[in-house]
Image (cartoon, rainbow, N blue to C red):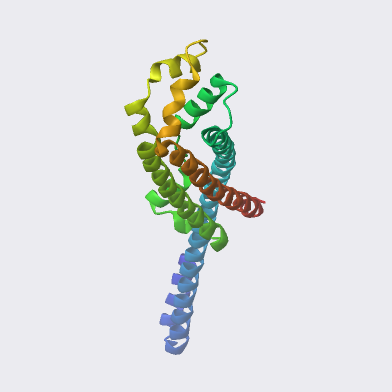
Amino acid sequence: MFRLFRSIRRRLIVRNRITDYTLYSLGEIVLVVIGILIALQINNWNDLRQERELELKYLGNIRVDLVRNIAEIDRFIDVRSSLIEDAGVIIGHLEGVPIADIHDFNQRCIHIYEWRRFSQINFTFEELISSGNLSLISSARIKSSLLKLESDYKANKAEEDHFRFDSEELLYKPMYDQIDLHPMLRDYMGETGVLVQEHFDVYRTDPRFKNGFLMVILECSKMNEQLEEMKGICEELITEIDAELG
């Protein structure tokens, strides 16, 4: 094609048709510009296609994280609900309900002392943030929900820190100072006949124990509310992502 253009250009110059040659030159420039624009548009389409493919890959991985996160949230809600139940039973005994089963009472106490921290499964979101690729997520709703989920997770971590502090001050310290843990642990591991009810008399005389178990009920209830809200966001995100992937 360029050879054809050169041939036409030579004929026009030979015939001294300046006006026609000028018009031809302008047309040639226009064609070149159009060709460049088409090439740029094709490159732009390719870039958009590649970005969309990468976005869908991220969304698929986020969905996997969300499903696993919901399962972890459910597990922790169950654990903390059982802590609330155990603390309620213990407080009932501290307020006068007779301890009919010293082994059960000990099991509930040890269970509450097993402090656990929730860890969110958000590997893909962290990768998006660290790589600066969060802008690849084109859906404003999905992006906003991911950021809200991260914000709620930080709030849950703050509540956990509060619970940890109260546990150390009201449960662990008085227990370490005033109780012989050896028979409690032996009973917890299945050994029988090593505990007597008098072993737990200090629970009634030191108000820190009762206050600590009350804090278990209050703070675990608060953390479960936060986890339920996070679970709702995860479920909404899965719906939004399914629409994008579909």
Pick whichever, 100 or 165, lies toward us: 100
Query: Where is residue 124 drawn, in percent x and y?
Result: 48, 45
Query: Where is residue 129 drawn, in percent x and y?
Result: 41, 51
Pick whichever, 187 or 117, lies toward us: 187
**The quadrant where residue 186 appears:** top left
Q: Is residue 122 visible?
A: no
Above or below: residue 103 compared with residue 205:
above
Looking at the rendered structure, the number of numbered marks drawn on it comes to 0
Q: Is residue 246 found left or right of 65 in the rendered image?
A: right
Write the residue at 32% across / 28% down: 177
Q: Is residue 60 found left or right of 126 in the rendered image?
A: right
Write the residue at 57% across / 61% down: 141
Pick whichever, 85 or 20, lies toward us: 85
Write the residue at 51% across / 10% down: 193
Above or below: residue 125 compared with residue 22:
above
Q: Residue furthest left?
A: 177
Query: Where is residue 210 drawn, in percent x and y?
Result: 46, 38
Q: Is residue 156 visible?
A: yes
Query: Where is residue 60 drawn, in percent x and y?
Result: 57, 45
Q: Residue furthest bottom?
A: 19
Pick whichever, 110 or 241, lies toward us: 110
Write the residue at 45% across / 34% down: 116
Above or below: residue 38 compared with residue 165:
below
**The quadrant where residue 68 appears:** top right
